[in-house]
Image (spheres, rainbow, N blue to C red):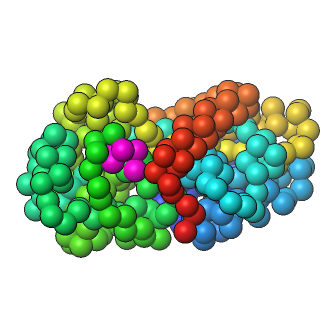
């Protein structure tokens, strides 16, 4: 079995999928190869998966970016998320953390917004790439707060984190895996989390909604899909195996850390979730005038 991860090794999606691949092998004895195919913000690996045989031997590690944001962008795409893929199960969900460089004189969202509106030069914000979940979350935040910031896209969250620590950019919605070590060391400061409720990893950090913007919510999420047309009985077997893998003690120990919450869903539930996220980000893309480039 091939599990395609459309990002480079070492990131959050890759880490979670390697845990699942190991548990799938442990449970079935069938070899599961993690195939990293980075590039194009996830487009390259996702397009490869879409063209695979519909025999149940290919899984794609999907995310908010590849299954909801990129498909919602205007223009042609190398795959159609609703035509080419069959949802299997969601894997996890986690909030983004609004972090600023330690030199930014703001300890709350309100102070940051006030500071941003008073500056002659806009703040520079980093993202893990154009039209990613981080990019769209920041645009949603800008629309809600009425502030203007300059987007600096990177080839992943890790290099963006290095630059905000160095002060080359000032603000970022980051994931916990990248942000927590720098928060603990005092190199970054957390202003809010984007989930509807506070994160267990940062219980003293308020949500954006609590910080004066009711209803604001955005989360990073991961899930597994296979090729459309895969027989229903095979999809059900894949679903059962993945749910079993996620319920293992090792999965709970290695995935459900740093603010991640393991989520299992039926194929139908995951399909409805993807459609809901697609609709949400389609509206943000249209309002903010975001393109792929």
Q: Is residue 152 left or right of residue 45?
A: left
Residue, x 88% and y 43% (percent of image)? Answer: 230
Query: From which residue to which does the magenta span run?
Result: 139-143
Q: Is residue 233 left or right of residue 244?
A: right
Above or below — where is 231 with respect to 36?
A: above
Q: Main secondary structure of the magenta part?
A: helix
Residue, x 88% and y 33% (percent of image)? Answer: 232
Q: Residue furthest left?
A: 105
Q: How many numbered circles are shown?
A: 0
Where residue 214 appears, x then y in whole percent? 32, 26
Where residue 124 appears, x then y in whole percent? 27, 65
- Quadrant where the image shows the C terminus: bottom right
Who is closer to the viewer here, 57 or 49? 49
Residue, x 43% and y 39% (percent of image)? Answer: 218
Residue, x 26% and y 58% (percent of image)? Answer: 171
Above or below — where is 252 with respect to 126?
A: above
Q: Is residue 110 left or right of residue 194?
A: left
Above or below — where is 221 with respect to 105?
A: above
Q: Is residue 105 left or right of residue 211?
A: left
Indicate the quadrant where residue 233 lies. Answer: top right
Where residue 205 appears, x then y in whole percent? 21, 36
Residue 278 appears in the rendering? yes
Above or below — where is 112 with respect to 157?
A: above
Indicate the quadrant where residue 1 lies. Answer: bottom right
Residue 184 appears in the rendering? no
Residue 153 belongs to magenta span: no
Who is closer to the viewer here, 142 or 99? 142
Who is closer to the viewer here, 113 or 258? 113
Where residue 67 appears, x then y in whole percent? 64, 48
């Amino acid at each position: 079995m091939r599990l395609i991860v459309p990002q480079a090794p070492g990131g959050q999606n890759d880490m979670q999928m390697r845990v699942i691949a190991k548990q799938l092998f442990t449970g079935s004895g069938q070899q599961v190869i993690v195939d990293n195919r980075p590039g194009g913000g996830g487009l390259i690996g996702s397009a490869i998966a879409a063209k695979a045989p519909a025999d149940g031997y290919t899984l794609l590690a999907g995310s908010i970016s590849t299954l909801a944001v990129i498909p919602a962008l205007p223009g042609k795409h190398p795959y159609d998320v609703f035509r080419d893929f069959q949802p299997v199960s969601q894997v996890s969900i986690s909030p983004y953390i609004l972090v600023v460089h330690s030199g930014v004189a703001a300890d709350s969202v309100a102070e940051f917004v006030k500071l941003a509106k008073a500056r002659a030069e806009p703040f520079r914000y980093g993202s893990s790439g154009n039209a990613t979940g981080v990019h769209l979350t920041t645009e949603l935040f800008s629309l809600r707060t009425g502030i203007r910031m300059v987007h600096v896209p990177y080839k992943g969250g890790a290099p963006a984190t290095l630059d905000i620590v160095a002060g080359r950019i000032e603000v970022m919605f980051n994931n916990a895996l990248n942000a927590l070590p720098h928060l603990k060391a005092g190199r970054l400061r957390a202003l809010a989390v984007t989930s509807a409720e506070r994160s267990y990893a940062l219980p003293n950090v308020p949500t954006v909604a609590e910080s004066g913007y009711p209803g604001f919510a955005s989360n990073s999420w991961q899930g597994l899909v296979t090729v459309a047309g895969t027989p229903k009985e095979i999809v059900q077997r894949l679903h059962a195996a993945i749910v079993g893998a996620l319920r293992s003690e090792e999965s709970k120990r290695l995935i459900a850390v740093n603010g991640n919450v393991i989520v299992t869903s039926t194929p139908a539930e995951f399909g409805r979730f993807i459609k809901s996220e697609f609709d949400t980000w389609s509206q943000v893309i249209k309002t903010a005038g975001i393109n792929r480039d």
